[in-house]
Amino acid sequence: MGDSQQENSKGKGKGSKSYESGTMDDTNELLHLLVDAINSGLRDANGTLSKQNIEIVILPCLNVKIRFSKTYNHYLSRMKWFKKQYDKMSTLMCNNSGFRWDPIAKTLTPSDEV
């Protein structure tokens, strides 16, 4: 593959359009909007936010505040990222710091040594 072909293929995902990744400011803004939505009672009975609430309430507010508009697929991708970050933090807290997750109290609790 020539240099110009390699340059043209960089940053392209499954589709033909290049994907503009979000910044941490975008991610923080999304997180604040999600917390506000949850605090205002937009969660479904199962505790999640519906696709409709994401597309009607959260994404329009997010897109007003950021440079590149985000879609529901961008939201799903960022939620996977949040879950990975949570898993990393849980592993760190549970395995390396003397804290463990108490599923009954739903809190991190220290070991006796800590």
Image (cartoon, rainbow, N blue to C red):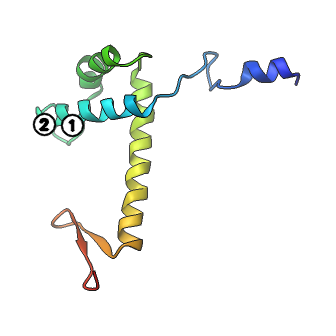
Locate residue 100: give its quadrant.
bottom left
Q: Which numbered disc covers residue 94?
A: none
30 on left or right of 88: left
Residue at screen point 39% across, 38% down: 79
Residue with the mark numbered 1: 35
Would you call the spot at circle 1 few (<14 residues within 10 Å), some (14-19), or many (20 or more)?
Answer: few
In the current view of this chain or complex, which residue is farthest to the right? 2
48 on left or right of 81: left
Task: Label 2: state its secondary structure.
Answer: helix
Image height check: is 14 above or below 110? Answer: above
Q: Nearer the viewer, residue 55 or 95?
A: 95
Q: Are marks 1 and 2 in contact (CB under 8 Å)?
A: yes
Q: Position of residue 25 (x, y in %)?
A: 38, 30
Residue with the mark numbered 2: 39
Which quadrant is the C terminus positioned in? bottom left
Q: Position of residue 112 (x, y in %)?
A: 24, 85
Task: Label 1: state its secondary structure.
Answer: helix
Q: Amino acid at mark 2?
A: Asn
Q: Nearer the viewer, residue 112 or 49?
A: 112
Q: Position of residue 110 (x, y in %)?
A: 25, 75
